[in-house]
Amino acid sequence: MAEEVEVRIRETGPEIGTGAGGAARVEPFAVALERHGLSLVRGEITTLQVNTGYLCNLHCRHCHLEAGPERTEIMSRETMEAVVSFAQRFPFRAIDITGGAPELVPDIPFLVEGLAPLAPRLMLRTNLSALSGAARESLLARCVAHRVVLVASFPSTNPSQSDAQRGAGVTETAVAVLKKLNAAGYGVEGTGLELNLVSNPVGAFLPASQEFAERKFRADLLRKWGIAFNHLYMFANVPLGRFRTWLLRTGNYERYVKTLTEGFNPSAVEGLMCRTLLSVSWDGFLYDCDFNLAVGRPGGDRKVHVSDIRELPSPGAPIAVGEYCYACTAGSGFT
């Protein structure tokens, strides 16, 4: 097994902690896999994730991409056309549009229209506040028409906790948008318009049980604001980008890294999203996942543009890993 892992797992780039400045020294992720008799390689690719760029109206503390209003990296119309052409060549079961805040990218309606017929399930990720205002009405109408699944970030049903992560007053705006989505049929039983929420912890700890958290969110949102939704997904924060900076500044870095490594769950490896997903960057290059995109680690040995792809990576192909992968395998995992 040791020889298999050495050949099939690529691990590059800086470790989470190298011991410098008191940071935790971490067992390489590939070594942890080997110790548990595991390998992390490609399965059948079923999902295409499209990152439309780093422009966002918020400065969320947990953002691994350091997205914000000042970022200028957004997907061009030309790259969108290349992504649509790529999706036409291969039978993806799901396509996931993410960012940044995809709603703010000027040609996002074109991307939604182009991708909607190409997969049974098209998802659009939103921070909710970027969907507010009259300027987003036409985008919402397109989402309804194409039965786009909305995946909305909503960290906590406690406004003070949520605002601490995302910015003052953001929860109030998000609640107003959720009510608007419910009015359009999203999250309402029998409409077929799916509204799912995503919650990341507001501090340096692992998320609560997803089953328990969903029950609490459902009860709180209904009681406080009369809001309904379909599912809640709980994800650990990845120690990259702005969240890494916050951990270091507040002295929580070493403890959080220790929490992630001690929470390593071998059972989560089989279901990791990188086994079945390809991620496309705002400028059209392929990565194994959005976290490898964040640190600039392309899939394979070099950067390849979607317009140059003639076949998908085959099952058994290697996946680039780093110590931040511990966030995807801690507790219930990040699937």
Image (cartoon, rainbow, N blue to C red):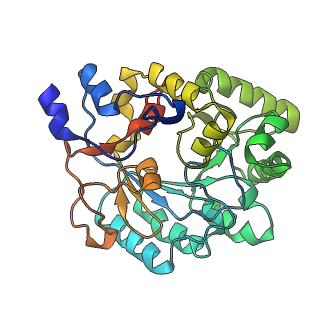
Pick the front one: 94 or 321: 321
Q: Position of residue 106 (x, y in %)?
A: 62, 75
Q: Position of residue 52 (x, y in %)?
A: 52, 65
Please identify the quadrant where the N terminus is shown: top left
Write down the quadrant of residue 219 in the picture. Answer: top right
Q: Left or right: 298 with respect to 237?
A: left
Q: Against 186, is 50 above or below?
A: below
| Residue 117 seen in render | yes
Q: Left or right: 263 with respect to 236?
A: left
| Residue 199 seen in render | no
The extreme front residue here reads: 21
Q: Left or right: 30 with respect to 166?
A: left
Q: Position of residue 44 (x, y in %)?
A: 26, 45
- Point 58% across, 32% down: residue: 253
Pick the front one: 127 or 231: 127
- Point 21% across, 61% down: residue: 311
Write down the quadrant of residue 40 in the picture. Answer: top left
Q: How many marks?
A: 0
- Point 57% across, 25% down: residue: 255
The extreme left residue here reads: 3
Please identify the quadrant where the C terminus is shown: top left
Q: Position of residue 251 (x, y in %)?
A: 65, 32
Q: Against 235, is 65 above or below?
A: below
